[in-house]
Image (cartoon, grey):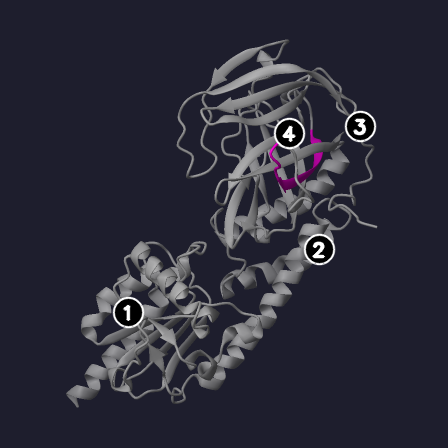
């Protein structure tokens, strides 16, 4: 028997909202939605089983200025998804219930490329315009970076229909590209009861995102306090981690991991028997898993750092071997990563932009940088040309000036972090005597104005030591 993410709710009585009062004038309300994301058939209906399912929980509370704070938690099943740090948050609305920024988003992986899917907001800002055959136009802020249609969107009330216990207006929404979505809004209040949104991903493949209200429940003060405790702790933790909303990586830095580990026990206690229990369980699993991986990667680093590097065998993209003499007596930085440009990997692109900047600064001081492309297709003579074209596409896209080469067994000899569950990139710094002095798996925590400062400091130390040695 399947249990929904939010089946473990507070012991409150679930009531259908039927008051004619606007939600902005009411107290705290819990909303639960279920949704699917499916390929569409030619008649604009779902074709086959959904490629993704999701549950959305919202806690809506009034603010003194007449707007509302809508806290949310999303649970995604199938087709990839956001790391737990981006699956919850708060959206503020104005008095008309217009969200400042809708952060309720799914992440779906399609043919190796991640696509952001914005979830319809639970409140409808044009409730005052609803009526039989009503039509209007209004601007609509872009929800995704690639949306550039600035023309007003068209809204049309196409009828009324009963959805569950709700008497609803159906609103059809279109733009210059045609019909985009249909919304079913409770006729007595601006509450979204059902939504169907048309989304194009991949190479023009039409999909349908559907969601429907499962339940709506007002909360008394005691029930609200029980929900607020884990929610407030989660939001505080989110602020402390200082991660971007668009960060697709599930990996935390050592400092971030410690912040979470210090709070996770308290979070577990607060979230028990609340709608956030499953979310916190996923946080606990992730922290434990990353802690184990960190320990395993540290073990790899201890075995290699301070010891002579194994033979470094690399090939150019044209298949020519890199002569060992090019590395002898040099400060060498190896950056192992996929370097795929088709499809482009999610940001931060292995931090290669910052690496290229570092290369420009330190190249004249003796640093050699090699981006080492890791792709199983290089081992297949039929697929190798495709892999090379993908690397060149990435080089051009990022305007990289340091050489990108092909591995010839070096990663295995150094210690592949993927073998212990960690992920590339891997950064290996080798001193002029051929010893490994730095081994780092994963991306660096960076600030835009500082770049790869931790790595740069290690390089500068070697440069100074090399100069001092020559002076002697």
Tell me if 33 is positioned left or right of 434 in this view.
Answer: right
Q: Residue at x 55, y 22 (%)?
A: 173
> Where are the magenta residues, as a range?
28-43
Q: How many marks?
A: 4
Depth check, front residue: 277 or 66: 277
Q: Which residue is mark 2?
A: 268
Marks 2 & 4, CB-CB < 8 Å contact: no
Give the spatial CA distance, label 3 vs label 4.
21 Å
Q: CA distance from mark 3 to mark 2?
A: 28 Å
Q: Earlier in the sequence, mark 1 or mark 3?
A: 3
How far separated are the C-alphas under marks 2 and 4?
33 Å
Nearer the observer: mark 1 or 3; the answer is: 1
Name the residue that disc number 3 marks.
Answer: 15
- Ranked by sequence position, the earlier of labels 2 and 1 is 2
Element on which disc 1 rests = loop
Residue holding disc 1: 403
Q: Secondary structure under badge 3?
A: loop
């Amino acid at each position: 028997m399947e249990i929904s993410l939010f089946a473990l709710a507070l012991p409150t009585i679930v009531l259908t909202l039927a008051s004619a009062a606007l939600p902005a004038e009411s107290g705290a309300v819990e909303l639960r939605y279920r949704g699917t994301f499916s390929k569409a058939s030619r008649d604009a209906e779902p074709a086959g089983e959904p490629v993704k399912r999701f549950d959305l929980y919202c806690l809506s509370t009034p603010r003194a200025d007449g707007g509302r704070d809508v806290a949310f938690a999303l649970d995604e099943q199938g087709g990839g998804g956001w790391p737990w740090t981006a699956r919850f948050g708060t959206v503020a609305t104005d008095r008309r219930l217009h969200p400042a920024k809708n952060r309720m988003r799914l992440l779906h992986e399609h043919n190796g490329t991640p696509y952001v899917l914005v979830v319809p907001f639970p409140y409808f800002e044009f409730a005052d315009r609803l009526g039989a055959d009503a039509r209007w136009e209004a601007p609509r802020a872009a929800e995704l970076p690639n949306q550039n249609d600035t023309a007003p969107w068209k809204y049309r009330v196409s009828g009324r229909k009963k959805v569950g216990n709700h008497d609803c207006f159906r609103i059809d929404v279109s733009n210059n590209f045609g019909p985009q979505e249909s919304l079913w809004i409770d006729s007595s209040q601006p509450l979204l009861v059902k939504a169907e949104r048309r989304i194009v991903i991949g190479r023009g493949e039409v999909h349908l995102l559907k969601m429907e209200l499962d339940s709506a429940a007002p909360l008394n003060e005691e029930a609200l306090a029980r929900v607020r405790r884990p929610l407030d702790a989660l939001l505080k933790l989110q602020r402390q981690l200082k991660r971007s909303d668009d960060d697709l990586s599930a990996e935390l830095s050592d400092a971030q991991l410690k912040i979470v580990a210090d709070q996770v026990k308290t979070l577990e206690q607060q979230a028990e028997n609340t709608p956030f229990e499953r979310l916190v369980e996923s946080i606990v699993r992730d922290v434990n898993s990353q802690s184990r991986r960190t320990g395993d990667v540290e073990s790899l680093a201890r075995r290699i750092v301070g010891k002579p590097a194994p033979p470094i065998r690399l090939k150019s993209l044209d298949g020519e071997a890199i002569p060992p003499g090019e590395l002898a007596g040099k400060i060498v930085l190896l950056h192992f990563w996929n370097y795929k440009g088709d499809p482009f990997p999610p940001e931060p692109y292995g931090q290669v932009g910052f690496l290229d900047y570092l290369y420009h600064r330190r190249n004249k001081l003796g640093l050699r940088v090699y981006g080492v492309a890791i792709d199983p297709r290089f081992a297949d003579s039929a697929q190798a040309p495709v892999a090379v074209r993908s690397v060149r596409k990435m080089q051009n896209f990022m305007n990289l000036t340091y050489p990108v080469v092909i591995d010839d067994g070096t990663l295995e000899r150094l210690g592949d972090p993927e073998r212990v569950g960690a992920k590339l990139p891997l950064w290996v710094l080798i001193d002029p005597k051929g010893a490994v002095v730095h081994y780092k798996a994963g991306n660096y925590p960076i600030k835009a104005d500082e770049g790869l400062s931790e790595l740069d400091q290690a390089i500068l130390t070697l440069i100074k030591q090399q100069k001092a040695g020559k002076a002697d």
